[in-house]
Amino acid sequence: NTKFPHPQYTRVIAVANQKGGVGKTTTVVNLAAAYAEKGFNVLVLDMDPQGNASTALGIPHDDPNQPSMYNALEGEIPLADAVQQCPMFPTLDVVPSNINLSGAELELAGYDDGTVRVQFLRNALAEYLKTCGKRYEYVFIDCGPSLGLLVLNCLCAAEEVLIPIQAEYYALEGLKMLLQSIQNVQQMFNPQLVISMMLVTMFDRRTVLSREVYSQIEQYYPTVLLKTIIPRGVRVSEAPSHDQTVITYNPQSSGAIAYREAALEIAMRGNAHPVTVRPHQPAG
Ligand code: ADP
Ligand code: MG
């Protein structure tokens, strides 16, 4: 039973990749569960209108009248009013999202001031962390599959970015654009922001390709690539349909074990070896 070190301050981590289906949501909910299981206070902000993180954490979000991320972003309610406790863990809180959030993208675009429109989440979160009366060790932001204004809000609210990369043929395609967006946010709005981690997901031990993808990323980003690899596993993909994380659904499955290991590695390394983005053209 390994002891996880306490972070010295609240680590706010955006899990981002504009590609869909690379494991962002799965990574958010299972890292959050792995820390909550250890008794840490964790907050998950669901910033994807599809609300998959809300589902996997057992938070009902199909009632459009229920307070959600949308209302908080719009400033109709304080973020605190949208926070719900995950039924699986007493120390895991979630701000759910629903389809209303897709409308926020357009409404944000209506603000002429480019600085104002990317800072709504940052302001709402800062206010909440100041007034909530507890200390969160980790805040995970689940980004949707785009590089639009909602995702820019996520990158402005975070201090670290974790990029999940699916071990498949086109893994590195699109990474350059993502890095460019992160760099823009760094330069214009959020100088603290660092890419602190990359995590290879859905790794298939039987294929040479999976190993090649891993070593290619290792070659480009040796300091941020996590040693822990998330294997492809059927339990991981089943868990959300039971409104669960794989950590709770099947605690001894390879996926659950790997996500706990990743959580430990992330806790141990802190945000000590970030890369400030250096744009380049990755092969592949
Ligand atoms: P994203 O949030 O980037 O769109 P998801 O986390 O929703 O990606 O994952 C996409 C799909 O792949 C989901 O159906 C999910 O259950 C499945 N999946 C994610 N990680 C794994 C894994 N390690 N093994 C098997 N299936 C996975
Ligand atoms: Mg997702």
Image (tube, helix red, strand yellow):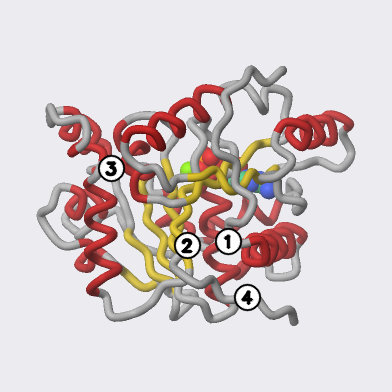
Label 4 crowding class (10 Å Cα cut-off): few <14, some 14-19, many 20+?
few
What is the spatial separation of the Cα atoms under label 2 and label 1, in whole angstroms? 13 Å
Label 2 residue near ligand 1, CB within 8 Å: no
Foreground tag (2 vs 1): 2
Residue 251 at x, y = what percent? 69, 70
| Residue at left offset 56%, top offset 36% | 21
Which residue type does callout 1 highlight?
Leu
What is the spatial separation of the Cα atoms under label 2 and label 4, in whole angstroms? 13 Å
Which residue type does callout 3 highlight?
Ile
Foreground tag (4 vs 3): 4
Residue for badge 2? 11
Which residue type does callout 2 highlight?
Arg
User: In the visual, does 202 lie left or right of 103?
Assistant: right
Q: Secondary structure at mark 3?
A: loop
Residue 212 position (above or below residue 13) = above
Evaluate if marks 1 and 4 touch, with contact meaning CB atoms under 8 Å apart: no
| Residue at left offset 22%, top offset 64% | 127
Residue for badge 4? 5
Residue for badge 1? 31
3 or 1: tag closer to the N-terminus: 1
What is the spatial separation of the Cα atoms under label 1 and label 4, in whole angstroms? 15 Å
Q: Secondary structure at mark 1?
A: helix
Q: Quadrant of the C terminus?
A: top right
Q: Secondary structure at mark 4?
A: loop
Evaluate whether residue 250 shows in this view.
Answer: yes
